[in-house]
Each structure stands twice: as structure tokens, then as C-alpha cells.
Image (tube, helix red, strand yellow):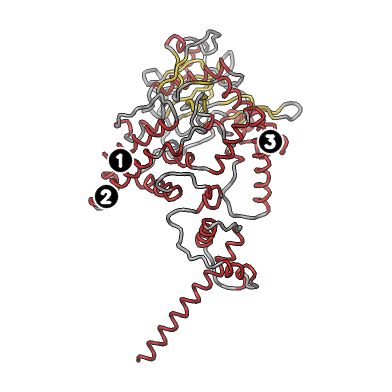
């Protein structure tokens, strides 16, 4: 098999985990089981890649098309996780024009000859979008973005629901062939997510939905973490050699912060972000899960969306976001390469914004602009939906959240500034901003940063920048750097003069 073919085959997982042990898998049993379940001889199994939760194999048969075998590396996933994923793909296949892999057979438990939960599914052609994105022209990239908008439009208009949760089918529908034309009966049920059952969370009885709103959903996530750390928080801290009294105090403070956040969710999820109808939201709508092909005229066409595990329904707010690979970067570098890339990203964001308004309406445009200015829901996602955090990590995230938004968790418009978002937090250096007259003199000064050995750390510049912004000054990072240079220089001069005075006084006394 040549390199091009190998690359095409790796289109079912972009993430490889090399440190963990591989599955204890009997390949002969896998071949026999695939032959039996798909009713044709399976002659070869080739391992393609290994992700966080799955190992992916290519199965080849004497007759008929190849097949992808996705074997679960995590046996603690409930069977409902697989049932929901199958239902989601079947719903998308039956109700939209989005192509997803056909499922030939599956088992969500380890009670099978392979001794692992598995899915046998169609091998779609194409490559990951991320493998070719940076080779594309701007016009080709815009063509891809238009197709992404069309995919979101399909989900928004054809996958509408009244509750937030995961999709499920009745047992008869599950037993039918995936490619059957028969109409299935679907329902919204509990959210299946590792956040509810990994790392001891399964010991906490949690309401997992369906939910009537995003506010209710996040309230349940916060409640789960609060109850978990009330029980296990002190033990975790004691394992880090922290004094028992201090551990108990920190747990009480964390629970108070979670209580406060829970009570202020209504300030965060206003009507614009949290209203029906709900829509189906892919859990990882990234370039690694979009398969593309080049046409004979060198056009790029999205031919399939893969990896629907953990997908759930959500709001239009959940659906409407810039693809991560064209989002604004919180970077300070002003190299020509970065400036050119940032300019292209902005151009692509503007194009995506216009396309979204054309297809999904002005309300979407308003949401995209709101998301740039208000990051509270993004920060809640970081705390409660992306991963399970250790005690001290969650403690720090909560501290930053309330530092940014206050005890009322109200939006802070100043944090729309990317540098403020990057740096502003409780660990900033406290700086005393001089008067406007002195600031202007600094900016007009002939002294330059390069003319002195005084080095101004980025953290100090960030502290000056954020303090200036909080006082409604509209200086750039470069201007803030000049101001910080003079402030730092003055501080060092004052310290030096004070030290000299102390030395002089000591000499007089002796």
C-alpha cells in the first residue's frame, strides 16, 4: 500500500495516543466476527490509528466494499453511548443531505466475541479537511466554508427538537439495517457524556436530562461537580500533602463559588442564547471530522461528516460559531507571516459571517458578534463540558471567571479585546498608571526601548495594557509597551535612588 493510500485510510481518527497500551485484541476473532455479522468473508484487518477512546481498523473482504471497525478503548462507556451515536447517524442520514457512514453492525457492550464494544461502518472516501486546508487558495477555502454553512443550515432546518439531550431510537429501529428505507421512531433522552461518569463521577447521582434549557443543563453540570468535591475534594488535596484544615477550608470555598455560579446562571443565559427550537449539534465539528475530495476541476467538495459520538441537541447559540481554524488568535507576534495569516483569517471570518446571515438569517449574525464580545458561555464550557478538572484547576478557573465578570457574572465588554482575554486575571501585577499628561510625554519621548538595558517582561506590559484598557484608554499593545518601558524605568530609578539614600545615611551614622 503506498503512502497516499495510507493517508486516505486514516480518515476515521486524527488523534493518536502513543503512551497508552493498545487493545488486547485477537485479530483472528475480529475477522471471524466481521465475516459472520456482515455475511461475507473478511480476509484482512489493518490497524489505522488510535484515538483517545477508540482504535480504528480497516477490514477487507473477499467481495464487496471495505469496512471500518471502530473498537472502544474505554469499557466504562455505557451501552447508551453507542445507542445514541447510532441513532444520531441514522437520523442525520434519513432527514438531511449530510452524508455520514452507514453502520453495518454494532455492539455497545463487551459481551461479544471481540470482547470490546465496536461499530462496523462504511468506509467513506476522501481525506480529512485539515490535511489539505493550508494547501488551498483563499477562493477554495471560501468554497469549503460555504459548504460548512450549508451543513449547519441542514442541521438547523431539518433537525429541530423541543429538549436538550441525546438522540435515541426504539428497539425495533435499532435492530433494522442502517441502510433500510424504513422510517424510525426517534426520541430525545439523557445526555451521554464522560463528564457524568469518568474519574469517579458515576458515584454521584446526577440528572442527565433531557433538559429544557442550556441554563438547566449547566446547572446540572455544576451540581454534579459541587457534590463530587464536597465528598472527594479534601481527599484529593490531602494527597498533595496539604494540611487538613486548609483542605477543608478550600473545599468549602470552592462549593461556595459553585453555589454562586449556579445562582447567577440566569444572568448568563438570556433569551437570545437560550431559546427553542433546539437543534442537533455535532460534538466535535472540526476539520479532522470533515472528509473532502478534489474534483476533476480542482474544486474541493465536502463528502462526509464523521465521528458523531457524544453529539446532542442544543441551541442556535451552540450551532453558530466560527470554525476553530479561522478563529481569531490571541497572539502578540507581529511578524509578517503572522500578520498575513491573521489578515487571511479575518477575511475568511467576514466571508463566513456573511454566508451565515444569507443562509440562517440576521439573528445568527447578531449571535456571532455577541460571541466575540461575551465569552462567559465559552468559559463555562471550559470549566464543565470540555473535560473533567482536578480540584485546583477548577478552583483556578472559577477564580478567573469571577475576576473577569464579578460576583453577579455580568458580561464584561472590555474582555472582547483578545489581549485582555489572554492576560487579564488575578495574577496580573498591580501597576499605578500615571496621569494622561505623563503618558503623552512617554509616547513622545525620544528614549527608545532599544536604547537601554532595561528589559520589560511581557507580563508587566500586559498588566499596564489591561489597566489602561480598564480605564478606557484605547492604546495598542505597542503603545502600552512604550508606556510600560518608561514606567518600569522610573520604578527602577526610584528603587536605585532609595537604595543610594539608605547607603548614604548608613555611612553618615557610622
Q: CA distance from mark 2 to mark 3?
A: 53 Å
Q: Are marks 2 and 1 in contact (CB under 8 Å)?
A: no
Q: Position of residue 359 (x, y in %)?
A: 65, 27
| Mark nearer the N terminus (2 vs 3) | 3
First along the sequence among labels 2 and 1: 1
Q: Write the residue at 68% across / 44% down.
A: 344
Task: Quadrant for residue 208, please give it.
Answer: top left
Q: Position of residue 421 (x, y in %)?
A: 51, 49
Placement of the N terminus among the 4 image quadrants: top right
Residue 242 appears left or right of 66: left
Q: Which residue is mark 2?
A: 249
* Residue at the spot of label 3: 141
- Taking the spot 48% from the left edge, 76% from the top edge, the residue there is 494
Total label count?
3
**What residue sits right under mark 1 in the picture?**
229
- Considering only order in the chain, which callout, 1 or 3, is on the residue closer to the N terminus? 3
Amino acid at each position: 500500500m503506498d503512502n497516499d493510500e495510507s493517508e486516505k485510510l486514516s480518515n476515521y481518527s486524527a488523534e493518536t495516543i502513543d503512551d497508552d497500551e493498545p487493545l488486547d485484541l485477537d485479530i483472528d476473532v475480529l475477522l471471524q466476527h466481521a465475516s459472520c455479522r456482515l455475511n461475507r468473508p473478511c480476509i484482512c484487518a489493518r490497524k489505522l490509528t488510535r484515538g483517545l477512546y477508540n482504535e480504528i481498523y480497516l477490514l477487507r473482504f473477499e467481495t464487496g466494499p471495505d469496512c471500518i471497525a471502530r473498537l472502544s478503548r474505554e469499557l466504562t462507556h455505557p451501552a447508551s453511548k453507542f445507542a445514541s451515536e447510532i441513532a444520531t447517524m441514522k437520523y442525520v442520514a434519513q432527514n438531511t443531505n449530510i452524508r455520514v457512514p452507514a453502520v453495518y453492525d454494532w455492539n455497545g457492550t463487551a459481551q461479544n466475541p471481540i470482547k470490546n464494544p465496536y461499530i462496523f461502518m462504511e468506509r467513506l472516501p476522501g481525506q480529512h479537511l485539515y490535511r489539505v486546508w493550508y494547501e488551498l487558495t483563499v477562493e477554495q477555502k471560501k468554497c469549503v466554508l460555504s459548504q460548512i454553512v450549508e451543513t449547519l443550515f441542514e442541521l438547523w432546518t431539518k433537525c429541530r427538537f423541543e429538549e436538550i439531550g441525546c438522540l435515541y431510537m426504539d428497539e425495533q429501529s435499532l435492530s433494522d439495517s442502517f441502510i433500510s428505507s424504513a422510517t424510525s421512531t426517534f426520541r430525545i433522552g439523557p445526555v451521554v457524556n464522560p463528564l457524568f461518569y469518568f474519574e469517579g463521577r458515576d458515584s454521584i447521582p446526577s440528572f442527565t436530562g433531557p433538559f429544557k434549557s442550556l441554563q438547566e443543563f449547566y446547572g446540572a453540570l455544576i451540581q454534579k461537580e459541587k457534590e463530587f468535591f464536597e465528598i472527594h475534594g479534601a481527599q484529593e488535596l490531602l494527597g498533595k500533602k496539604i494540611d487538613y484544615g486548609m483542605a477543608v477550608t478550600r473545599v468549602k470555598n470552592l462549593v461556595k463559588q459553585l453555589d454562586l455560579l449556579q445562582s447567577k446562571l440566569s444572568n448568563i443565559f438570556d433569551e437570545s442564547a437560550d431559546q427553542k427550537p433546539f437543534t442537533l449539534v455535532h460534538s466535535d465539528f472540526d476539520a479532522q471530522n470533515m472528509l473532502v475530495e478534489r474534483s476533476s476541476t480542482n474544486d474541493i467538495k465536502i463528502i462526509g461528516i464523521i465521528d458523531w459520538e457524544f453529539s446532542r441537541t442544543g441551541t442556535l447559540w451552540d450551532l453558530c460559531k466560527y470554525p476553530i481554524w479561522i478563529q481569531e488568535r490571541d497572539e502578540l507576534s507581529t511578524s509578517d507571516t503572522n500578520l498575513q495569516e491573521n489578515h487571511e483569517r479575518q477575511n475568511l471570518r467576514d466571508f463566513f459571517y456573511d454566508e451565515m446571515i444569507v443562509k440562517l438569517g440576521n439573528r445568527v449574525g447578531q449571535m456571532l458578534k455577541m460571541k466575540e464580545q461575551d465569552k462567559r458561555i465559552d468559559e463555562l464550557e471550559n470549566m464543565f463540558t470540555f473535560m473533567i478538572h482536578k480540584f485546583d484547576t477548577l478552583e483556578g478557573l472559577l477564580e478567573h471567571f469571577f475576576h473577569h465578570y464579578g460576583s453577579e457574572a455580568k458580561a464584561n465588554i472590555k474582555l472582547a479585546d483578545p489581549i485582555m482575554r489572554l492576560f487579564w486575571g488575578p495574577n496580573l501585577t498591580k501597576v499605578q498608571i500615571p496621569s494622561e499628561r505623563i503618558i503623552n510625554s512617554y509616547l513622545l519621548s525620544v528614549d527608545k526601548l532599544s536604547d537601554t538595558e532595561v528589559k520589560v517582561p511581557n507580563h508587566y506590559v500586559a498588566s499596564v495594557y489591561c489597566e489602561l484598557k480598564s480605564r478606557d484608554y484605547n492604546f495598542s499593545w505597542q503603545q502600552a509597551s512604550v508606556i510600560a518601558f518608561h514606567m518600569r524605568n522610573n520604578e527602577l530609578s526610584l528603587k536605585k535612588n532609595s537604595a543610594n539614600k539608605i547607603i548614604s545615611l548608613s555611612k553618615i551614622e557610622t
